[in-house]
Amino acid sequence: MTPRTHLTTIALLCLMAPIFSLAAPAGFGAEQEDKSKSIFDHLTRSEPLEITIRTDLGELINNRRRDTYQEAQFSYEDLSGAEASNAIEIKPRGKFRRRVCDFPPLKLKFPKKQLLAAGFSEHNDLKLVTHCVDDKEIGQDYLLREYLIYKLYNELSSNSFRVQLVKVTYEDNGPANLGKIKRFGFILEDEDEAANRMGGEQCECRGVPKDSLMAADERLMSMFQFMVGNSDWDMAMSRNLLQVRLSNNYVLPVGYDYDFSGLVNASYALPNSDHKLLSVRDRIYLGHPAANAELQQTIGLFQSKKEKLQGIVSGFKLLDKTSRDDIAAYLNSFYSLLDQLEQQPEAEWYKLLRQPISGPVFPQAQPASVER
């Protein structure tokens, strides 16, 4: 090779290098080897992950009722410490929160082709729970309380949504020039991914009969909703539930969306008047009828996890002590109710749980035989 030819080859390689760089999936390709891993797995950290979302914030906030995606840039620090950046699409999501929140919750859609090229699974839809209210202190408190609920659920069962806490910088690149907004948020794993992880597939199931449900999981989910004071769900309508159809054809119900719960106690939340609740802090059990012996199995699990759950709350120092103490007291009132049930073996526990309950004491004792 002559010196001139050698120099020409080098020049051509230099010109071609950016082309190859652009062809490679930006941001999340280099360190991925396990092809069963998802983008959610890739973003999972033990600590809050710092991310930046650049988009037209004016369009996002002012046109929140639309159901179309808009372009955005999603940036974060990968495990090697380098900044990774990917073009994604985002849109407002939800129903109530989309209407009432100062900042709507979002759906993040990653390009499947890039995910697959990088060796990830095709699960590309992630929900981002946002701060909702502009008041930074109040918005952060509500959001962290709801995030904590998911972590409590994770402790009780792997059949629950995984979540990743994030510190988000929303950066406006639109004509409104809104600058930057920095808030906490958290990401939920893709619904299809969650269903696959639990051994089934997501189904649009409504009106699933009791005998087609995984009974123990249904009771656990229902008791968990009772524990956190959430009545904003419905089994028959599959509202705020992921329904997972398992290989045995049974359905596994998994709860989500807890901003109307008593544990969060958001100022915008409304008590469920259909069940005659007067406060969002009131509790009512909305699961299927169950005999005492069945409920005892579920209660036994919650009793065995009491110290673990209390430890998760007390150790979550991102919430201030006042909030942690409030949550601890609310959980203690739940455990007081469980203790009262176990002290009344002759009562029909389901009927006691099925009435509106304010505080740590049942309104009245209702002894009755349990239908078998």
Image (spheres, helix red, strand yellow):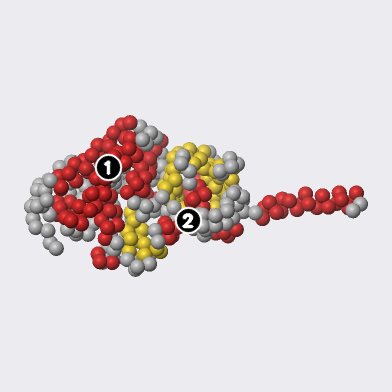
Where residue 296 appears, x then y in whole percent? 20, 52
Q: Answer whether labels 2 and 1 touch (C-beta < 8 Å).
A: no
> Residue at the spot x=58%, y=40% of the render?
81
Residue 229 visible (yes or no): no
Residue 216 visible (yes or no): yes
In the image, what residue type sits under mark 1? Lys
Report, in whole angstroms, how far the alpha carbon at label 2 lies from the one at label 1.
34 Å
Where residue 131 appears, x then y in whole percent? 41, 42
Picture quarter containing residue 54? top right
> Residue at the spot x=32%, y=37% of the render?
311
Where residue 127 appears, x then y in whole percent? 44, 52
Q: Relative to residue 276, is residue 115 drawn left or right?
A: right
In the image, what residue type sits under mark 2? Asp
360 lies above or below 6:
above
Q: Which residue bears the numbered disc 1?
A: 306
> Residue at the spot x=46%, y=41% of the render?
46
Nearer the observer, 33 or 357 = 33
Q: Quadrant of the C terminus?
A: bottom left
Q: Relative to residue 203, is residue 89 drawn left or right?
A: right
Where residue 106 appears, x then y in whole percent? 45, 50
Q: Which residue bears the numbered disc 2?
A: 125
> Residue at the spot x=40%, y=61% of the render?
199
